[in-house]
């Protein structure tokens, strides 16, 4: 993935979807489950709104995290002007230096590790939420089932917030210094 | 200071109609040269003035595909001179040959009604050209800074500085400095955290023998222009870099000390440079990139 593609997909996932859509939706469901607001339509659409939406987007998060180092390293600049025509030997040395310095200076491996851990935590919280919801929904109305998974819903929202925070440390631009 | 303007264009049959009134309003006479690259003939507009055409211009604008006409037929062969010579195009700068894009340029088509120069552009360009003719510094006109969507050259220069400083630190580990611009740059670029991995890669990739190349101008110029540059083009790339970097920064590099010295060294044989000079330039670039919001 080129830096431009990665940046675009990062923006679509982190800013457009997670921050401005999914977290707001989760907060709305927490409010409903907590009894602070009734919304019959939302109560009936938990599986579609939350579960399907999460499943549609979670793999994109994984792909962005795993491709960050390759896509956003300053060595990618060596394939672009003004370096495009530089001799291979010059490019190889600059690629090694710029990449390794970036990894060390920016704590890149730690950032990726943190984002991975946050994603796994969110996946785990989602699995618990979904399992409890499906179990409770068999014997209860949607509003009751929702109330019964309030803690799971809160935990999942907190994990998604933490994921958003850790994801933001994966820089939006190619950092050279 | 010369006062006339010359436009050289092998792509447009249009003569003076669009461009002349603009410069006339600014009190400047305009001449247009059209030609076909395969032919020797050039046509001057107005045609009746061919015999009295000035040889010295305040400003020459040449379409990016007309470089050979300006460079070879007029400037070199016929001895025309210009205080400021700019290419123009409406194509993306990334599509231009480096030997052209490293020179000063504008994204306009002065001869046509599509994307012509504006009145403010004309006044800015003339003021800039006059200052240049007098050897004075002046801010780069906005119309000349269009190509700086991101500070590509400044970022590239910072990577070259890293390559140079890392090579010097690796080759002389016992002499690694503890203070001064070299030491400061090594600290800022994360050298001490990364140097073992870099050293391992150097040996595994068989690069140890070639590390000394960073001390020569050729290494820097090839990185920017490729290994097929002729000497004259390398010189123009080096001098063009200073302009491009100034345009990217939107401030004069003369306000600093490290970057101008590094850029001067690229074109001046008698000048020498050492790790402290490059370290100073690197720290200045880092600070500029942070100011521009392109780092940190």
Image (tube, grey):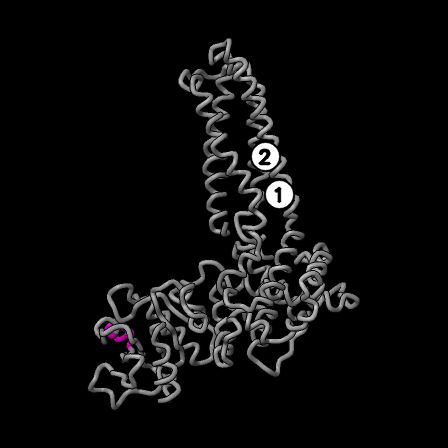
Mark closer to the chain start, 1 or 2 = 1
User: What kind of element bears circle 1?
Assistant: helix
Q: Which residue is mark 2?
A: A119
- Look at the image and tell me whether residue B29 can be seen: no
Residue A36 appears left or right of B105 = right
User: What kind of element bears circle 2?
Assistant: helix
Q: Main secondary structure of the magenta part?
A: helix
Number of numbered discs visible in the structure rendering = 2
In the image, the segment drawn in magenta is: B20-27
Q: In this picture, is B141 found above or below B293?
A: below
Q: In this picture, is B21 found above or below A93?
A: below
Q: Nearer the viewer, residue B210 or B8?
A: B210
Q: Chain of mark 2?
A: A
Query: Seen from this angle, which residue lies furthest right?
Result: B174
Q: Which residue is mark 1?
A: A112
The reply to whether the magenta stretch includes residue B25 is: yes
| Contact between labelled residues 2 and 1, with CB atoms less than 8 Å apart | no
- Look at the image and tell me whether residue A123 can be seen: yes
Q: Nearer the viewer, residue A86 or B63?
A: A86
Measuring 74% from the left and 64% from the top, which residue is drawn there?
A: B179
Measuring 52% from the left and 34% from the top, which residue is drawn there?
A: A58
Residue A4 appears left or right of B68 = right
């Amino acid at each position: 993935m080129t830096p431009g593609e990665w940046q675009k997909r990062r923006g679509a996932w982190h800013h457009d979807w997670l921050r401005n859509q999914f977290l707001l939706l989760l907060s709305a469901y927490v409010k409903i489950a907590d009894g602070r607001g009734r919304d019959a339509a939302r109560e009936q659409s938990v599986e579609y709104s939350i579960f399907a939406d999460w499943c549609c987007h979670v793999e994109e998060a994984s792909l962005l995290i795993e491709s960050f180092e390759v896509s956003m390293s300053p060595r990618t600049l060596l394939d672009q002007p003004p370096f495009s025509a530089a001799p291979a030997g010059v490019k190889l040395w600059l690629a090694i230096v710029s990449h390794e310095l970036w990894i060390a200076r920016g704590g890149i491996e730690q950032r990726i590790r943190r984002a991975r851990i946050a994603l796994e935590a969110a996946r785990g919280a989602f699995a618990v939420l979904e399992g409890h919801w499906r179990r409770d929904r068999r014997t209860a109305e949607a509003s009751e089932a929702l109330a019964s998974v309030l803690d799971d819903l809160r935990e999942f929202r907190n994990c998604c917030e933490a994921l958003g925070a850790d994801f933001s440390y994966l820089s939006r631009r190619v950092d050279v210094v | 200071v010369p006062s006339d303007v010359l436009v050289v264009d092998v792509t447009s049959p249009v003569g003076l109609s669009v461009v002349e009134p603009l410069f006339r309003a600014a009190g400047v006479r305009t001449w247009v040269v059209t030609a076909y690259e395969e032919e020797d003939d050039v046509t001057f507009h107005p045609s009746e003035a061919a015999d009295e055409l000035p040889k010295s211009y305040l400003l020459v604008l040449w379409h990016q595909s007309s470089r050979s006409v300006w460079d070879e037929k007029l400037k070199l062969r016929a001895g025309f001179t210009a205080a400021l010579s700019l290419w123009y195009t409406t194509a993306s700068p990334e599509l231009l040959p480096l030997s052209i894009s490293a020179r000063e340029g504008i994204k306009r088509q002065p001869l046509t009604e599509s994307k012509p120069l504006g009145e403010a552009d004309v006044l800015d360009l003339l003021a800039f050209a006059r200052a240049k003719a007098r050897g004075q510094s002046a801010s780069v006109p906005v119309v000349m800074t269009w190509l700086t969507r991101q500070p590509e050259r400044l970022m590239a220069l910072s990577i070259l500085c890293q390559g140079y400083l890392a090579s010097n630190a690796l080759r002389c580990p016992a002499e690694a400095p503890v203070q001064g611009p070299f030491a400061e740059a090594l600290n800022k670029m994360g050298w001490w955290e990364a140097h073992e991995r870099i050293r391992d890669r150097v040996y595994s990739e068989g690069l140890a023998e070639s590390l000394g190349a960073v001390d020569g101008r050729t290494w820097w110029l090839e990185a920017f222009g490729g290994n097929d540059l002729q000497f004259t083009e390398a010189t123009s790339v080096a001098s063009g870099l200073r302009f491009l970097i100034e345009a990217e920064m939107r401030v004069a590099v003369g306000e600093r000390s490290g970057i101008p010295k590094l850029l001067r060294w690229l074109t001046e044989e008698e000048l020498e440079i050492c790790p402290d000079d490059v370290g100073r330039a690197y720290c200045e670039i880092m600070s500029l990139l942070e100011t521009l919001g392109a780092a940190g």
